[in-house]
Image: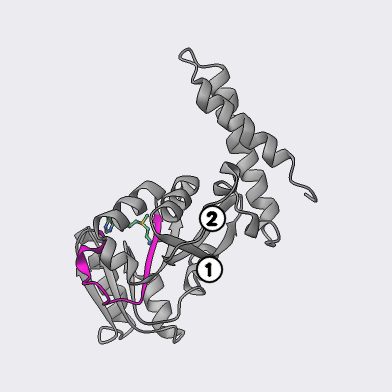
Amino acid sequence: MLTPRLECIVGRVRAKAAADIGCDHAYVPIRLIEDGRAERVIAADMNAGPLGIARENIGRRGLTDRIETRLGEGLSVLSPGEADVIIIAGMGGEMIETILRRDEETAKRARLVLQPMNSQYELRKFLILNGYEITAEDIAVEGYKVYNIIEAREGRRPPFENEFDYQIPPYLYGHRYFKNLYDKKKREFEKIVHGLEGAADHNKDKHDLYKYFLKELNGIEGI
Ligand SMILES: C[S@@+](CC[C@H](N)C(=O)[O-])C[C@H]1O[C@@H](n2cnc3c(N)ncnc32)[C@H](O)[C@@H]1O
């Protein structure tokens, strides 16, 4: 049994060759093969410890012929075009951006399934302003935790009209977990605004921006 977050990620993949960057335990690669969602998977991690556990799990399931493990940083373990779907999950949004920037050709030749633990706003902005289009987005919920799963590929679409849309894109408004996301973002914005109000070195631009985010959030109808 996978957690709802990992289930959601698995459910977004259909690949001849998938790559899971930062695979840790390799639960996702194993499930992709067992569910017939990928013909083969490259399970990669920059740390030998997690990759050793991944290898044990893969061996125990008898999947060493379908899942190849590779030790290395980000997309450096892949050659361009080798994977048609690349998963990068469970890391900070800024780390995901760094990984995509470092090996842009490899990133742009695949469909990306990204699950940032934070900085979703910054990651969406990076994607949209750097030659990617966001093709779909999903939300997974585990108790009070809310996760965004972002699918992207090389492409160009007009940027969002409003800055707020990078925080909560309008295409998520009808999602069954939208209320969970809404509540999380409200808590986050309020915390930032109140924090800035109490700060000695008051950052007026940031304060104004998050007050604007909060106003836009409160203006969403039908919550
Ligand atoms: C928190 S775990 C997430 C594991 C899994 N992807 C998930 O979503 O549950 C992060 C894993 O990514 C690996 N990692 C972190 N930065 C990485 C990078 N730049 N390149 C490859 N692996 C990385 C870590 O060693 C760790 O095993």
Q: Indicate whether residue 88 is drawn in magenta.
A: yes
Whether pointer 2 and pointer 1 mark residues with C-beta atoms closer than 8 Å, the reply is yes
Q: Which residue of the protein is positioned furthest toward the top in this rendering?
A: 200
Query: What whole-number distance in Å separates the C-alpha atoms at marks 2 and 1?
Result: 10 Å
Using the rendered view, name the quadrant where residue 88 is placed: bottom left
Using the rendered view, name the quadrant where residue 14 is placed: bottom left
Q: Which residues are magenta?
A: 74-90
Q: Indicate whether residue 104 is drawn in magenta.
A: no
> Compared with residue 119, is residue 209 higher up or lower down, i.e. above or below?
above
| Camera-side residue of 104 and 142 | 104
> Compared with residue 179, is residue 15 higher up or lower down, i.e. above or below?
below
> Compared with residue 200, is residue 169 higher up or lower down, i.e. above or below?
below
Question: Left or right: where does residue 200 sit relative to residue 57?
Answer: right
Report the residue at 60% width, 35% height from top.
Answer: 189
- Which amino acid, by three-letter code, is at mark 2? Tyr
Quadrant of ligand 1 in image = bottom left
Q: Which residue is mark 1?
A: 8
Question: Left or right: where does residue 199 sit relative to residue 190?
Answer: left
Report the residue at 54% width, 48% height from top.
Answer: 166
Give the crowd class for mark 2: few <14, some 14-19, many >=20 residues within 10 Å.
Answer: many
Percent across and percent down for residue 118 are 46, 46
Report the residue at 31% width, 76% height from top.
Answer: 83
- Counting residues from the start of the chain, the first of labels 2 and 1 encountered is 1
Using the rendered view, name the quadrant where residue 31 is placed: bottom left
Q: Which residue is mark 2?
A: 147
Kind of element beneath mark 2: strand
Kind of element beneath mark 1: helix
Colour treatment of the image: one colour
How many callouts does the rendering have?
Answer: 2
Percent across and percent down for residue 22 are 31, 61
